[in-house]
Image: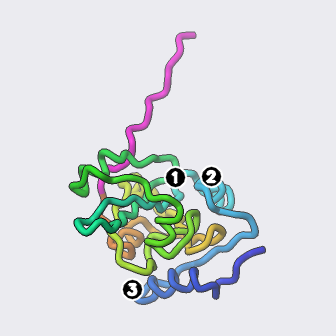
Amino acid sequence: MTERPDHPAIQRVLEAAGRRGVTLELRTFPESTHTAEQAARAVGASLGQIVKSLVFVTARDDGSLEPILCLVSGPNRVDVARLGAFVGRSDVRRASAREANELTGFVIGGIPPFGHERRLRVVMDPDLGRFATVWAAAGLPNAVFPISPASLRLLSDAQVAPIAEDQEPPILRAS
């Protein structure tokens, strides 16, 4: 069953964009767009055009968790050491599903790049800039929206940094 656009999670995303003067073209699907592969198939885009919103955490001085949201191109993986170097922390780790939900107000697979319950530090993979349009989650695991990388960066107040792991070069075999 497709979620309705008036779902509270989707509304938070639409309202956050609206406060910045942007109207999003929301698309919902009967099937899940939880993974980058599922989202790419659903919207007919390349895997690289899918924005993965990944939550990492570091400890604050008081022991509470400080979230860091990474917006990463579909095939890429975050290099935790690079992310830690960029944010100036050595204790960065991936958030658990529970932590991600508590820190963003959204479930994994539906975490949007903006519209969270609290302000987050956001770091964006520069590979997303290779495309005219990218697709991001809209608050639920079956809702997405298209957006230009420049608008994505502005709406999420992201810093762009090379946080992805180096891609392995293809293995060439002698014939």
Left or right of 79 in this view: 31: right
Q: Are marks 3 and 2 in contact (CB under 8 Å)?
A: no
Where's residue 164, x and y in %?
38, 47
Q: Which residues are magenta?
A: 161-175
How crowded pointer 1 is (Cα within 10 Å; few <14, some 14-19, many 20+) is rated as: many
* Residue 49 x, y percent position in the rendering: 52, 57
Q: Are marks 1 and 2 in contact (CB under 8 Å)?
A: yes
Prevailing secondary structure of the magenta residues: loop
Secondary structure category for the residue under label 1: loop
- Helix, strand or loop status at disc 2: helix
Does residue 40 sit above or below 155 in this rendering?
above
Nearest the viewer among 47 and 82 is 82
**Residue at the location (24% across, 54% down)?**
89
Residue type of the residue flagged with mark 2: Glu
The residue under label 3 is 20
Relative horizontal placement of residue 159, taking residue 69 as reference (left or right) = left
The quadrant holding residue 57 is bottom left
> Which residue type carries mark 1?
Gly
Residue sitting at 52 percent across and 68 percent down?
111
Q: Which mark is residue 37?
A: 2
